[in-house]
Amino acid sequence: MMDRNISLLSLDGGGVRGLSSLYILKHIMEFIDPDNTPKPCDHFDLIGGSGSGGLIAIMLGRLEMDIDQCINAYKRISNHVFARKRILPVGGNLRRQSRYDGRRIETGMKAILHELGYEDDVLLREPDNPCKVYVCVTDAGSKRNLAPLTSYPSKYCSNELYKTARVWQAGRACFSTDPLFDSVAIGPSGRRFYNSSTEVNNPVREVWIEARGIWPSGSLDSQIKCMVSIGTGVPSIKRSGKGMFGLFKTSRTETIDTEMDMNKFIREHTELDDEKRLFRFDVPNGLADIGLDGVDEIDTIVDATEEYLAKELIYKQIQRCGKALGGDS
């Protein structure tokens, strides 16, 4: 059997609720070393994400932030981006406008880059970084195909995007959900991209497929030391009610069932779960019902996450995850 030495982190999308995944990850990292909390990039070989999870993956992996840095930066950029809604739904050319100005994502990202000592146009590409970064975005064309952006050469990322995608562009694409934001152009061809929260809100399978391409030798399952998947909240129960003529109707919600994707993945890789090498964390009780732009509910997000982490079963799962990630038997 091959050495189990690969650790993967998959992060769901969720707008401002991405803070929940950061607080969960903070507890995992603190368990590894409570006195000197390590950076996630020092323990994960690949960090992948969709939507806000993609932006967090860039911050933690490509920019090598520690957890507290990332939490503070994520709060600031969320407050900056969602501070002001556009008053008019259409622009001067009568084209429908997004609810928020996407340029504020760009300015927020560049401010973070400056603080960390990077130039405005630093590329996402960084093949020598031992922590690889993979983010799911969606081509804004008619077919809405997935178009991964990576910090390393990948057969699934086009050469044009790999060579030209800038950190701020990737971050803006990750945060740009229609109709909240317009898409963003990346590369010389001017192709435009949204985030993939509609197509792939839980990217655990995409992260797995990407890892299989990075480490193709033998079975990936046998090489995994620890795989962690973190969600941004489970929606509350939606009950059906009777509509006209006595027909049943189901209440609609903007939330996406990310747990269904996770259950499929666990069935496909049940030995990872059996051997305590696969972990999924996701706050229940309706956290997902908070809007992607719900910056006024940041305290609620943090409180709900801390309450979830205080539960005995979750605390034990955090311990097991920290031990697996830190290499303790």
Image: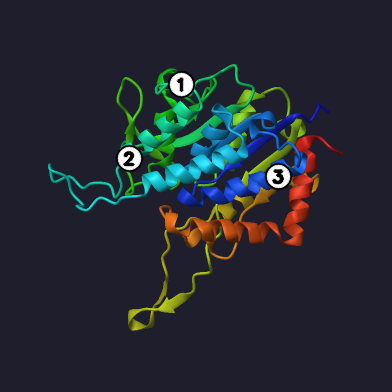
In the rendered image, which quarter contains the N terminus? top right
Is residue 231 visible in the rendered image? The answer is no
Q: Which residue is mark 3?
A: 28
Q: Amino acid at mark 2?
A: Gly
Task: Please say if 151 is above or below 227.
Answer: above
Answer left or right for 194 relative to 223.
Answer: left
Task: Please say if 314 is above or below 197.
Answer: below
Q: Which residue is mark 2?
A: 102
Q: Which residue is depicted at the point 22% across and 53% down?
A: 87
Q: Nearer the viewer, residue 1 or 191?
A: 191
Earlier-in-chain disc, 1 versus 3 = 3
Determine whether the residue tagged by mark 2 lies in a helix, strand or loop: loop
On residue 184, the disc is none
How many C-alpha atoms fall within 10 Å of the one at disc 3: few (<14), some, or many (≥20)? many
Q: Which residue is mark 1?
A: 162
Q: Amino acid at mark 3?
A: Ile
Q: Which residue is depicted at the point 47% across and 31% down?
A: 148
Residue 30 drawn at (x, y percent): 72, 43
Answer left or right for 316 relative to 196.
Answer: right
Q: Amino acid at mark 1?
A: Tyr
Q: Residue furthest bottom?
A: 246
Q: CA distance from mark 3 to mark 2?
A: 32 Å
